[in-house]
Amino acid sequence: MEQNETTEILYKKEKTNVNKKIMNFFTIKMFRYNLIKMLKVISTWVMFVLTLIVGLIMVLSLTFGMGYIASGDYMDTARSLFTIYSWIWYMLYFGLTSMFIGFKVVQLIRDEIDDGTLLIFSSIPISRTRMIIEKWLSLQLLCLVYSVTILLLPPLLILGTGQKGAAFGKVILSKINFMILTSFILQLFLTTIGILISLGLNSKGVIGILFTLGFLTVIGAMIPFIYNTSKMGEKSSQYLIQTADLAKNSVKFKDYDVIQTYDDLLNPIGWPIWTQRYEKIIIESNITQNIGELETTSLVKDIEAVVTKIGTNSIAWNDFIAEAKKTPTVYPVLSKLINDNILQFDGYKTQKFLGLSLEASNGIEFKNNAGKGINILSDFYNDVKLPEHITISQEKPSTNNKISLSVLKQDKLKIKTSKNIYKIIKAMYDKAIFSPTVIGYAKNSCASSSVISPYSITSLIYGSLSSTTKNKFNNFYDNFETFLKSNLYNENVYIDDLVMTIYSQFVSQMLYWLNKATYDKYGGVYDKKAQTQSELNKVQKEQTNYKLMAYLNIWQQWVVMWTGNASVSVSGAGYIVSSILLPVNNYLNVKVNSVTYNEKDKPDNIKTNYFLMGNFNQPVVLDRLTSMYIGYLLVTFGLAGLTLWWITRKDFV
């Protein structure tokens, strides 16, 4: 009986001791003491407010600096701006954060060593390991709240500043997980280094080293920019810089037929980007022939009917308008424009590219491009196009800026190549690489390159008129363009055919990609394959240089982690400076391609030229985000272990 009571007492005592240990473990008095101590210091709040103000100024200035877009879709512009924002913000944020961590580490460790506080703490019943861990944890919590608040608050605030702010805010928030994760990992890294060196150096030394790390952050971000800028004159570097965004936004396919179609679709020999200069064919960035145009048959017919009805040799614009209004049923398409401000077209006609029509010769016929580029894309459009008329009016055809691919009817696709093209478009759409939006033209805009600009429409219609009509109506071009600007284009206008919109924007994006992925435009087409191989060797040599930078420049790796390896633009809406700011961490491998052709008046004289182009099925990634995050965590844990080992052996007297 007595033995059982003794056993029970010992058990209760042991249980009580265990409970006390558990309670002591979770009291974390040292943690609370250090956290309160840091919050009471004015420098904590000064650094916090200063960094937050800098972040707010940056997002607001970039947001309100965007130009006006009629469709209201600012996403691609915002993605390009994010590159500028993240690059500048990276240098400012980590420069200020390094100083912040330096001040806090000195306050928690070095000052307490110097004034004897840490010696007193080492004499109380708490292990040195636990003491330093709680100090480290209190610093981590403060830094985490600091980083999350400063990184998250500015983009959240600009969401309510209109379409521009909403777009830019969404882009930043889509990458905020990378920014916060990188900030957290680097604050672990910097605080651990700070605590480690504070055990052996005085406060000036600690702050000096951490300030130097912050300064090196700025230098590390500048190195890729300086290198990229210095190499802009070299063809090999220029190619790698230009293809970085294409490689970051690559799509991969498992089906061999789709891979082959993707390769054919982005083959330059199937696109009208060729011309002849000094009896040689070359690739240039400007298109040498139309890829398609709106059909104006009915509208031109009405215009010429009015001119015929009036009958005089010198027609005035007011007489022309009066005649069209007199009998609107006779001129239905023209009357719809004059009375209802609706510009109607019969449809959209695509153009294939089989050769060059040149004034200096009979032209050039390409022999190996029938199943390439715009030629197969044109067949795809003819399968899915809508039978209705196409109109340009002030009515926006869709409430959403981004058009759904459901308007492309898959059941219309009969050819395997067209089905593969749909799969390619769908894959790019799902990854937000291709995001078609309603085509709009802003009121009072001066842009003339848009397919629906007053200039483009007037030129298209005037070019379709007969010479008789042009002679009788000498000022038709100027009068018609003025009428469009004063009546239809006095508000934002939009095109209503969403299928044609998707097609034309996809064509534009493919042309932009080809422009970026073609090596040495204007001079990169060679008579001999050996010349192309020599250029290929130069590219491969430059690839080695970029690999060394990617692996050895740790601050460059921080930039890649911070931005989530962000891209500038995949559709041509990017700012020029954005493409050279970030490190080249991705690029497209190059391959040798050939073009076979003959002059039309010399069908037996077939020539073959060679050139380099990007291989869209072989994107290269130098550093992967996951491996970099894990690598820096392992280094941090190693430094933390060294710190714990040192503090258990250090004499604080």
Image: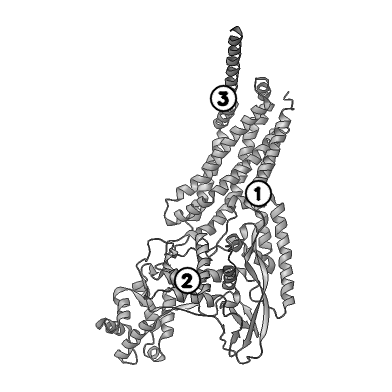
- The percent position of residue 113, horizontal first and vertical second, equals 69, 27
Q: Which class describes the residues within 10 Å of circle 1: few (<14), some (14-19), or many (20+)?
A: some
Residue on which disc 3 sits: 27
Q: Earlier in the sequence, mark 3 or mark 1?
A: 3
Q: Earlier in the sequence, mark 1 or mark 2?
A: 2
- Please state which amino acid type lies under the numbered disc 1: Met
**Could you tell me if the residues under marks 1 and 2 are in contact, i.e. CB atoms within 8 Å?**
no
One can see residue 595 in this view: yes
* Image: 230 above or below 289: above
- The percent position of residue 168, horizontal first and vertical second, equals 49, 54
Residue on which disc 2 sits: 503
Residue on which disc 1 sits: 628
For the N terminus, the quadrant is top right
Residue at point 65%, 49% (across, down): 628
Res. 157 mark: none
Q: Nearer the viewer, residue 437 or 549?
A: 437
Q: Is residue 127 left or right of residue 405?
A: right
Rounded to the nearest whole Å, what is the CA distance between mark 3 and mark 1?
A: 35 Å
SS of the residue at dot 1? helix
Residue at the far front in the pictured view? 1
* Image: 398 above or below 188: below
Q: Which class describes the residues within 10 Å of circle 3: few (<14), some (14-19), or many (20+)?
A: few
Residue at point 44%, 51% (across, down): 159
- Please state which amino acid type lies under the numbered disc 3: Thr
One can see residue 211 in this view: no
SS of the residue at dot 3? helix
